[in-house]
Image (cartoon, rainbow, N blue to C red):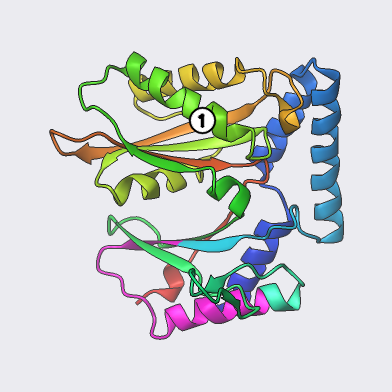
């Protein structure tokens, strides 16, 4: 089990997700700005070299988020969390990935050199669904550009777009564009950022099943790309590759909104772990 998790982390850090890679190639084909095309050519070449040489797509191999979809009635095997921590430490040390985790966050920010702990979220799902484990290394450049805000709950969809798109555009410049944007709407103060980060796990090109939400995703993608920031913030028409939105119920007096930014190096790996659960 530990070796499988280690392999997942190596795969996530060195092989760009196939959907993201395909969107980069599509962006290269339609970008008209010479500087933008040159940047995209470099990003595609970088992804090719990382895959061929099993080297990191980005030098910032990030903190590791772990999502476990656990079916009702199933239990984690004993020692599961310790196993995850060991797998992260071994994957990062053995492969020379940069260790970025420090503790305490204030004062003496000591780096143990193991990139642990992983940040684990357990997601209950229906009993009929498989147990799935996802690892998501995410760097600080895009993480630092993310945000959470409580908006006026009476906002119309159009007013929502007008309020959030300028915030995304301002942050895209420092997020190594072209970016991928995950948005969480609703829930509680702590739920919205989780929705936003999980939205980044949806495949690029996969709109929400809710037609109204899908329409909002398309509108926001178009508006962000109208900014002209372009690849590597050098100007162009491809500032954002995709926008995904996840929603949850919320309080009548609240509208919590979180945005999880990702650079082009959107990294994750998923496996079915049903056999590991009791």
- Residue 58: give x, y in percent of width and height: 74, 53
Q: Which residue lies at the image location 13% right of the left edge and 33% below the top edge? A: 252
Residue furthest to the left: 252
Residue that numbered label 1 is attached to: 168
Q: Which residue lies at the image location 14% right of the left edge and 34% below the top edge? A: 253
- In the picture, measured across the screen, residue 131 lies left or right of residue 179, that is left
User: Is residue 204 something that shows in the picture?
Assistant: no
Name the residue nearer the viewer: 145 or 275.
145
Q: Which residue lies at the image location 63% right of the left edge and 40% below the top edge? A: 175
Q: Which residue lies at the image location 26% right of the left edge and 20% below the top edge? A: 155
Name the residue nearer the viewer: 156 or 15.
156
The N terminus lies in quadrant: bottom right
- In the picture, measured across the screen, residue 118 lies left or right of residue 89, that is left
Q: Mark 1, residues whose alpha carbon is within 10 Å: few (<14), some, or many (≥20)?
A: many
Establish if 11 lies above or below 228. Answer: below
User: Is residue 166 something that shows in the picture?
Assistant: yes
- Residue 113: give x, y in percent of width and height: 66, 78
- Residue 219: give x, y in percent of width and height: 47, 17
Q: Secondary structure at mark 1?
A: helix
Establish if 100 lies above or below 154. Answer: below
Residue furthest to the front: 107
- Residue 263: give x, y in percent of width and height: 64, 41
Residue 72 falls within the magenta-colored stretch: yes
- In the picture, measured across the screen, residue 182 lies left or right of residue 37, that is left
The C terminus lies in quadrant: bottom left
Residue 127, picture quadrant = bottom left
Start-end of magenta stretch:
67-91
Residue 169, picture quadrant = top right
């Amino acid at each position: 089990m530990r070796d499988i998790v280690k392999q997942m982390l190596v795969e996530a850090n060195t092989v760009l997700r196939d959907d993201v890679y395909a969107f980069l190639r599509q962006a290269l084909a339609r970008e008209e700005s010479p500087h933008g095309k040159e940047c995209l050519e470099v990003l595609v070449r970088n992804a090719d070299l990382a895959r061929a040489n099993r080297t990191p797509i980005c030098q910032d191999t990030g903190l590791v988020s772990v999502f476990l979809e656990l079916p009702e009635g199933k239990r984690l095997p004993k020692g599961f969390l310790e196993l995850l921590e060991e797998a992260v430490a071994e994957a990062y040390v053995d492969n020379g990935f940069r260790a970025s985790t420090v503790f305490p966050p204030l004062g003496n920010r000591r780096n143990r050199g193991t990139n642990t702990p992983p940040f684990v979220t357990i997601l209950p799902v229906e009993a009929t669904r498989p147990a799935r484990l996802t690892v998501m290394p995410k760097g600080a450049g895009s993480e630092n550009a993310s945000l959470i805000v409580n908006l006026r709950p009476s906002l119309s969809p159009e007013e929502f777009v007008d309020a959030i798109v300028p915030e995304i555009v301002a942050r895209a410049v420092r997020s190594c564009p072209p970016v991928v944007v995950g948005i969480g709407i609703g829930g509680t103060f702590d739920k919205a950022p989780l929705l936003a980060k999980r939205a980044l796990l949806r495949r690029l090109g996969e709109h929400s099943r809710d037609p109204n939400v899908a329409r909002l995703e398309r509108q926001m993608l178009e508006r962000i790309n109208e900014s002209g920031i372009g690849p590597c913030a050098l100007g162009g028409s491809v500032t954002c590759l995709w926008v995904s939105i996840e929603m949850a119920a919320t309080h009548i007096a609240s509208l919590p909104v979180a945005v999880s930014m990702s650079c082009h190096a959107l990294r994750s790996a998923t496996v079915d772990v049903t056999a590991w659960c009791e």
